[in-house]
Image: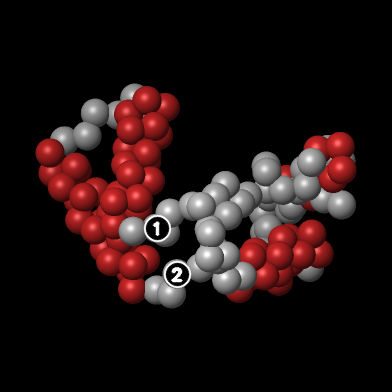
Amino acid sequence: LLSDLGDELLLPYLNPDSPVIESGNKHYAQAMKALLKIQSLKPANDYALPLYDSALLQREMALFPDWLLEKKLGLDLSEDERQLLKASFHALEESALAQPQVVVHRDYHARNLMVV
């Protein structure tokens, strides 16, 4: 895909102060339109990837304290902080599960999107 799509990442095209659609950044606007198109796709009957259920959402959210807070930032969370994080994750999980299920493109961000 890199040879077909080139090697120009979206990141350098974004304005670091305001990388939103309203800023007039056509590349960011195109990326958002493409994401909406991806989300409107219906999964095929033989769709191999699992839906984002409670267990998958919890696994994904567990990466935040494991990878960022503890490994990257070296933080040692208190029990109160862990409970606050747990409650926050529960609220996010409930909100996510209440929404319609759509096709998900993981890691959809400017360091992984190509400008063509």
Give above or below for 34 relative to 77: below
Residue 50 x %, y %: 43, 54
Q: What residue did someone put label 2 on?
A: 101
Q: Are marks 1 and 2 in contact (CB under 8 Å)?
A: yes
Using the image as rendered, state which of residue 97 and residue 110 is in the foreground: 97
Please state which amino acid type lies under the numbered disc 2.
Answer: Gln
SS state under label 2: loop
Q: Residue at x 55, y 50 (%)?
A: 106
Please give left or right for residue 79 compared with residue 92 in the image: left
Helix, strand or loop at disc 1? Answer: loop
Q: Which residue is mark 1?
A: 52
Residue 26: quadrant of the picture: bottom right
Q: Residue at x 39, y 58 (%)?
A: 52
| Dot placed on the residue nearer the N-terminal end, 1 or 2 | 1
The percent position of residue 69, horizontal first and vertical second, equals 35, 34
Q: In percent of the image, x 38 and y 46: which residue is there?
A: 60
Residue in the foreground of this view, choosing between 29 and 41 = 41
For the point 87% across and 43% down, which residue is it? 4
The answer to whether residue 55 is visible is yes
As rendered, which of 42 and 72 lies closer to the eye? 42
Q: Amino acid at mark 1?
A: Tyr
Q: Tell me if 80 is positioned left or right of 12 in this view.
A: left
**Residue 61: x %, y % from top left:** 35, 47
The span from disc 1 to disc 2 (Cα, nearest Å) is 8 Å
15 w.r.t. 5: above or below: below
